Image (cartoon, rainbow, N blue to C red):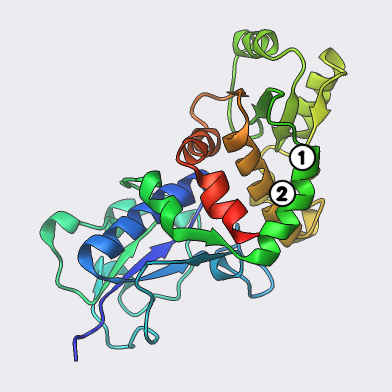
Amino acid sequence: MRIEKYIVHKGWQGFGDRLQCLSYAVSISKACSRSLIVDWNDRIWSHDEKGFYDYFRFEGIQQPRKRVPDNASVHPSFWQGILEKQCDDWCHNIKDWLELRLDLLPPEDVWVLGSVGFRRWDFNQLVHHLHMKQPVARAIREHLKQFDPSVPVVHLRGTDKAFSEEVWQRLRQSAPVAQIVSDDLRLVNRWLKESPDSIVLTDTLVASEGGGHLLPSDQLPKTKYEMNIRLLADFLILGKAKQAYGLVEDSSFFEMARLFGSCGGFEKVYEASL
């Protein structure tokens, strides 16, 4: 019997980064006939022993027949014997040790793809295989009832990203009245002061120097599950909107949402799961 080979995707940081790396892992799984394992059991995403597979499922992707054997060989070798280790900020300090070198065609049983460093994404392929779990899609549907695709959506990414006053004023001119998705209570309050007819869609705003996803659970305005559902709803809204504008140009959340929407992700990943 053929020995099973694996590609393990370790999640870290924001949802845009995760989707980029997930897309790359899907491509590797298909191209190299490796069983895909998605490990998002890090402190940013997971909660109550729930992780990626409590929110999503795959179709048409090779899934593991059994758990990875303890004696399986692993590339990069950093992960040998510690496949259960969860990613955290330390990943950025040793990212060279975590690099997955596919150009070397490593023979190891397990390839580990982290969320730091090089990645390649193909959302046209990803949206054909990724689906939301039905309870998740139905929970998101409740959040989408306020959303009007014909009204411009503005993504006020603040907290850990800098922007200039010129950029703010240009955004205000582009969408003087808008639907707002954000992670920053202070930016939302400023927008509403200048544009009181705008509508705030996000109900999980935080007033902190970092994004809400980085806060410990006891400092969140909602449960981690509710925060994740709201994040997914905001992502879909940005992808579905006819017009969407971002305050921060290099926000991967905004960029990936727009790409996800243009590839039919709203219909194939979300609506198909209802």
Residue 19 x %, y %: 46, 50
Helix, strand or loop at mark 2: helix
Q: Is residue 203 left or right of residue 53?
A: right
Few, some or many C-alpha atoms within 10 Å of disc 2 (few <14, some 14-19, many ≥20)? Answer: many
Residue shown at 74% from the left, 21% from the top: 178
Using the rendered image of the protein, determine whether residue 90 is visible from the camera's viewpoint: yes
Q: Which residue is mark 2?
A: 230
Quadrant (top left, top right, bottom left, bottom right) of the C terminus = bottom right
Residue shown at 61% from the left, 26% from the top: 242
Helix, strand or loop at mark 1: loop
**Looking at this view, is 112 or 238 the one in front?**
238
Q: Which residue is mark 1?
A: 202
Above or below for 265 versus 32: above
Q: Is residue 107 left or right of residue 69?
A: left
Earlier-in-chain disc, 1 versus 2: 1
Q: Is residue 139 left or right of residue 257?
A: right
Identify the amino acid type marked 2.
Arg
Pointers 1 and 2 in contact (CB under 8 A)? yes
Quadrant (top left, top right, bottom left, bottom right) of the N terminus = bottom left
Q: Tag count in the figure?
A: 2
Residue shown at 14% from the left, 54% from the top: 103
Residue 149 x %, y %: 68, 31
Q: Quadrant of residue 211?
A: top right
Above or below for 151 versus 171: below
